[in-house]
Amino acid sequence: MIELFSLEFWIAVLFIINFILVFFLFLFVKKLNHLNLSEPDQKYDDNAREDAITASGSAADIIEMLEPLVTESRKAALSFDEQIKEKKRLLKELNDALDSRIISINLLLSRADALQNKLEERKSQFNFESSSETVIDQQNQIIKMYNQNFDIDAIAQRLLIPKGEVQLVIDLKKKFVAMEENSR
């Protein structure tokens, strides 16, 4: 369905209007030439000849009046054509940019899936009996490694857990130790 306000619609309308105007202009000029070329019959008197001359003069005036309209409509059609070409170019650039972003996102998703699978494989290798024991064991490992002077990044990387979680466990352990010392 053609949109009412699309550029293609308006170009088509201008083309049809121009075609119709040229067609009527052609018919009008043909009629005038037919009147001018025909031999005046004896039926016509001097008034008829004057009317024919006046008609041909007014036809020339009409043609002169229509020429700027046709010229302006051609300019408008060319302008619309240039605008359509520019919009198509912009749409192509946007599509290309979106395609490259989609490809980048798909690559990132593939990497994330691979890392998740790798993480699940490593976790399954440890075969912990329950999740609560796993969390407690993991906290103990964090504290043990921190006491061995491992930094937070190294601990997070080795245990495959977020840095924020490592920092939280260390901070909580420090607070508990401080509370125990204050209660004594």
Image (cartoon, rainbow, N blue to C red):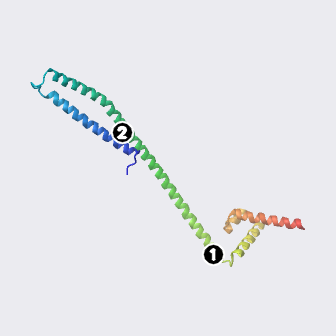
Q: Quadrant of residue 125?
A: bottom right
Crowd rating for badge 1 (residues with CA inside 10 Å; few <14, some 14–19, many 20+): few
Instruction: Work out whether 29 lies above or below 170.
Output: above
SS under mark 2:
helix
Q: Residue at x 30, y 31 (%)?
A: 66
Lateral position of residue 90 relative to residue 76, left or right: right
Q: Where does residue 152 sit, x and y in percent of width and height?
A: 72, 63
Give the Cα distance between marks 2 and 1: 69 Å
Instruction: Work out whether 18 lies above or below 124.
Output: above
In the image shown, does 68 or 142 lie closer to the viewer?
Answer: 68
Q: Where does residue 133 sit, x and y in percent of width and height?
A: 72, 76
Q: Residue at x 16, y 31 (%)?
A: 34
Quick check: marks 2 and 1 in contact, CB under 8 Å?
no
The residue beneath circle 1 is 124
Which dot marks residue 77?
Answer: 2
SS under mark 1:
helix
Residue type pointed to by label 1: Ser
Which dot marks residue 177?
Answer: none
Q: Where does residue 117 sit, x and y in percent of width and height?
A: 58, 70
Q: Where does residue 70 sit, x and y in percent of width and height?
A: 32, 34
Q: Residue at x 19, y 32 (%)?
A: 31
Q: Residue at x 69, y 75 (%)?
A: 131
- Which circle, 2 or 1, is nearer the viewer? 2
Lateral position of residue 111 relative to residue 99, left or right: right
